[in-house]
Amino acid sequence: MIRLIRVELAKVVRRPRTYLGYVAVLLILVPFLISLHYGRPEHFLRAQVGRDFAVVGTFFNALFLAHLVMKVVMVVFMPFFGSTVAGDVVAGEAGEGTLRTMLVRPVSRSAVLLAKYIVAALHAVGVTFFLLAASLGLGGLLFGFGDLFLFEAGLCIVPLKEGLLRLLGAYAAAALAVLSVASIAFLVSVLVDNALYAVGGALAVFIITGVVAVIPYFERLHPYLFITHMDLWQKLMLDPVPWAELGRSAAWLAGYCAACFLAALLLFRRKDILS
């Protein structure tokens, strides 16, 4: 199994398109860095909590950047970046014919698919934490480190050490949310022979589910939609943290990931690839 994972990981690493998400993350950070560097913190603070606050110094720092970027990028971009490899590991190789060559050898289809899913999951988690590392790294160079200012429910100032722990936990929760969309792309990837169709199919499900989630008529379905639980990372920015809600959302997303993989496994074992 370890050998199969290494083989799949080597194939993904050699593909230039694997790094598109990482490059895009760096490009997305540019306007945030410019706005924080030249922006005026007092205007931002008063827009969030009112005009009765006097601002001395700045709360723009690496932790604030990592949190601010997350609130914007997690809406659409990260699910897409996390799905690129998941939609390619099966469909891309099926279209190129390399999947047929691999399965000619005496190897278990289940083991092959599990190795591919593990690599796809590593990418989804990796690109999410790359956003954290890039935000803290570039933010630290330009603005330094300091307390984390949160505006989710009024103003909450979190000390540096706790702020870093909260961000680490929030990005871990966000990685699970990204993985849930990547798992859908992985499932679609088993059904098609084109990686673009797999990624596009996952994003279509993501968008349609998002539309359903905001329509009052489907209110009874909202607790069962994966997109309802994708904001679980935001719960780690509340004080106190609603751990019960966080755990429930994490369980739902983990269940969706497992269901998508099991469905993909069932389809992959029955799929006619060798003919």
Image: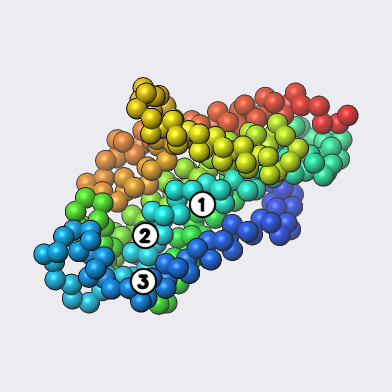
Q: Are marks 1 and 2 in contact (CB under 8 Å)?
A: no
Q: Is residue 98 left or right of residue 31?
A: right
Residue found 47% across the figure and 42% down from its top: 177
Q: Position of residue 178 (x, y in %)?
A: 50, 45
Dot 1 lies on which element?
helix
Q: Which mark is residue 200?
A: none
Answer with the quarter of the image where residue 98 lies.
top right
**Position in image of residue 182 (x %, y %):** 57, 42
Which image quarter: residue 160? Answer: bottom left
Q: Is residue 187 left or right of residue 165?
A: right
Reading the image, the residue beneath label 1 is 77
Q: Position of residue 75 (x, y in %)?
A: 44, 48
The answer to whether residue 250 is visible is no
Q: Residue at x 33, y 73 (%)?
A: 39
- The kind of residue tagged 3 is Leu
Task: Check the picture and name the quadrant holding the C terminus.
Answer: top right
10 Å neighbourhood of mark 2: few (<14), some, or many (≥20)? some
Q: Amino acid at mark 1?
A: Phe
Marks 3 and 1, how far apart in space? 21 Å
